[in-house]
Image (tube, rainbow, N blue to C red):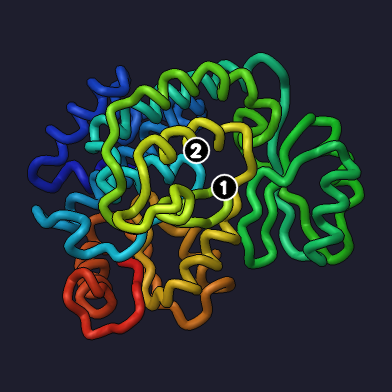
Amino acid sequence: MLSPWLELPGVADQLAAFGEAADLDLRVHGTESDADTIRDTAVAQPLIVSASLVALRAILDGRDATEVADVTAGHSVGEFAAAAVAGVFDDAGAVALVAARARFMAEAAASTPSGMSAVLGGDAEEVLAAIESAGLWPANVNGGGQVVAAGSLDGLAALGTEPPTKARVIALQVAGAFHTPYMESARQAFEPVATTWAAQDPRLPYLSNADGLTYADVSGATNGYGAAADVLARLAAQIAAPVRWDLCQASLAALGVTGLLELAPGGVLTGLARRALPGVETVAVKTPADLDKARDLIARHSVAGGAPRTAETLA
């Protein structure tokens, strides 16, 4: 996933700095490691955030994110890359913090067998009822007819055997039941690390996975974009709480977003947006070949970048 990015000037140095921060050889994991190795949560999370931030800096090409982005959000581990976009962390700080999160979550996942399954389609209320009936939790409520159920392996097997009407259940290759009470030990371990981490107040609107609110709304801020302390507290709590991406997408719609740029390794969130945010133009950045499309989207949609729009947009 990182091989094409390493052809760009400066990326090798970025990855070296990120790897030092995470205490991982991210270059090797992003170019040589096999699927089983990078599926390890302790590797996958810092690798994903690093890829996002490499893509971000390549897109910005020396500009500050506040010059082009009007609002930012991230799904689950993506909240840490979004925090860097918002200026809450520097890039290496975001990778180092998510590496700590990943280690605690890997330990929690290893302590008790658990997993996750995507539930696609079906009536929303019936899907949630079926998940609860199976003794599971809706770990990711993604919108667009997609909910990820998580919990015990027996419960996931039962849900797969008797899926909700007109719904498909697809087992996911993950290490454990993330964003559920199965991660409570990870939350407890991560909280004192996260809440004392070096951080700055957001410098642009930044949405929370907890409820789709901007941190200005969370803080009740009358000026500025919210408080770093609230960001840190919510990032810690989110380990064991559902990701409400449906509410984040609703907030993007309410803010008048017209363009959405998904950082590497991109594709999933733009797919959800095509169903939940019709009419919003999307670009998923997967390789450096997508950089020109990303910059063109910014030029045409970003209020911060000077595009002639009246509503806040996402770039």
What amino acid type should be assigned to the residue bearing mark 2? Arg
Give percent across and percent down for residue 214.
44, 56
Give percent across and percent down for residue 304.
21, 69
Residue linked to disc 1: 210
Which one is nearer the viewer's eye here, 34 or 236?
Answer: 236
Looking at marks 1 and 2 on the same chain, the residue that comes earlier in the sequence is marked by 1
Which one is nearer the viewer's eye here, 195 or 275?
Answer: 195
Residue linked to disc 2: 234
- Look at the numbered discs 1 and 2 and tell me whether their residues touch, using CB distance below 8 Å: yes
Q: Residue at x 12, y 33 (%)?
A: 13
Q: Is residue 75 visible?
A: yes
Q: Secondary structure at mark 1?
A: loop
Residue 127 in which image quadrant? bottom right
Give percent across and percent down for residue 158.
89, 40
Say whether residue 212 is left or right of residue 57: right
What amino acid type should be assigned to the residue bearing mark 1? Ala
Q: Residue at x 86, y 60 (%)?
A: 126
Say whether residue 11 is left or right of residue 191: left
Q: Residue at x 33, y 25 (%)?
A: 197
Q: Is residue 101 above or below residue 146?
A: above
